Image (cartoon, rainbow, N blue to C red):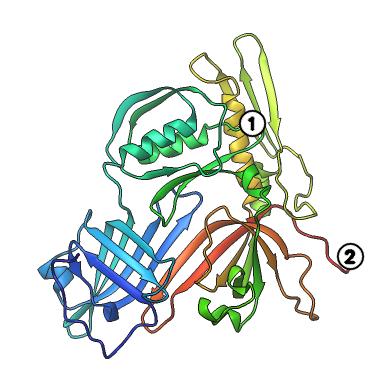
Amino acid sequence: MANVRQPTDNSSRQNFYCQIDIDDVELIPNNILSLTIREWVFDILPRLELIVMDDGVLTEGYPVKEGSLINITIGNSNEDEDMISMQFMVQDVAVDVLGDNKMTNVSITGLMKTTDMFTIRNRNINSSLSVDAFQQLAGEVDITFSNPDDISTTDRMTWLQLNIDNYKMFRHVLERSSKSGDTIFCYGNTASEIVVKSLRNATQTSDALRARYDLDKFALPKSRLKNGDEQVIWFNSYDIVNINGLLHKMGGSGFALDYYDQSRNQRKTSDVDFQLGNNTTKINPGQITNHQQFGIINDNVYNDYFEAVVRNQQLRAGFFGQSMVMAINPIANVQLMDLIDVIVPSLVDENMNDVYSGEYLVGGIIHNVSKGMLYRKRISLHRSGLNQSANA
């Protein structure tokens, strides 16, 4: 509960529910110009961007600084069943003085709250799988660890943490983790958890959610959606970006490696693809577009250590090059790495767009509330491959 309360102007009500306090100073909801929370499968911690109008409370009375604690609760209304309630720690602050020096706009960025995440450590994590190392690292910084699919790996070794903090150590272990013929992800979410998921498990699940285009249902509250419509992700707009041409040339199409196993030279390749579209987008599937030279593999690491490093890079570059970002009804309860079955409406008739419809994985989620606007949610969907055109 905030210790410093400011008088709230109830004459200008917001179109969303929002409570924010910074170092126990409660903010007036009407002064919040924009609040954005981003969660991403490639980020260890969710990120916050906040812009607030301020008359001196946050710049003179109780100045915001690195490490200041932000408590946030946002939702569609005060009856929202899926509110986001999180704590963030301030990273950076920028102050923009307005007109006659009577008001400022304070821009704040932050990361999900942790304890001692950025303290440099020198130690080893003895004889552990990468998943066990993630659990230990999360526990040390007071974050709940979640492995909902009970992912197991084949990378038991002693992990050395040399002059790096736990944030960098998460990435260090992730890049060198190994799940046979697969790759794993370790990321933070808005439930204040560190989650481990695998690409194979996510793409092969039978529990795909449905996403459908509808301008009316996109704006309806949950109470007005009937006959199963409340289980559908309704969207009203989307955009598509495809950078496969770049990522395939960086190794997404096919990766090779050489190393010495203490008796002879070894050469291995990786061109694994968990394709969700019917047709590949690769010009030459399996073509080697990146080749790495490693040194001698020694007894301090597991047997397919170098191969796993290359496979992780190849799978991530090969799968996430195509993205569809859509604005969805914010009542939808969507999680990172969910499998979504999308029907994109056709531009030429009343049928669906066969090429871009189909299954995608959720790679990112953006939550936003802004002055005078409704609570907004956007999701970034990704897949490898395209579906066959009906005209082909």
Residue depicted at 47% across the width and 45% down the height? 195
In the figure, residue 251 lies in which quadrant?
top right
Circle 1: element type:
loop
Q: Residue furthest right?
A: 392
In the figure, residue 371 lies in which quadrant?
bottom left
Q: Is residue 93 above or below residue 177?
A: below
- The kind of residue tagged 1 is Ser
- The kind of residue tagged 2 is Ala
Q: Is any part of residue 285 visible from this angle?
A: yes
Q: Is residue 212 above or below residue 131?
A: below
Mark 1, residue position:
180
Q: Which of the image's four quarters has the C terminus? A: bottom right
Q: Residue furthest bottom?
A: 11
Q: Position of residue 214 (x, y in %)?
A: 64, 79
> Mark 1 against mark 2, which lies toward the viewer?
1
Q: Nearer the viewer, residue 262 or 337?
A: 337
Q: Residue furthest front?
A: 227
Mark toward the start of the polypeptide (1 vs 2): 1
Q: Position of residue 229 (x, y in %)?
A: 62, 74
> Could you tell whether 59 is left or right of 163 in the image?
left
Mark 2, residue position:
392
Q: Is any part of residue 221 visible from this angle?
A: no
Q: Position of residue 171 (x, y in %)?
A: 45, 39
Q: Nearer the viewer, residue 186 or 109?
A: 186
Q: Is residue 288 above or below residue 324?
A: above
Q: Position of residue 379 (x, y in %)?
A: 54, 64
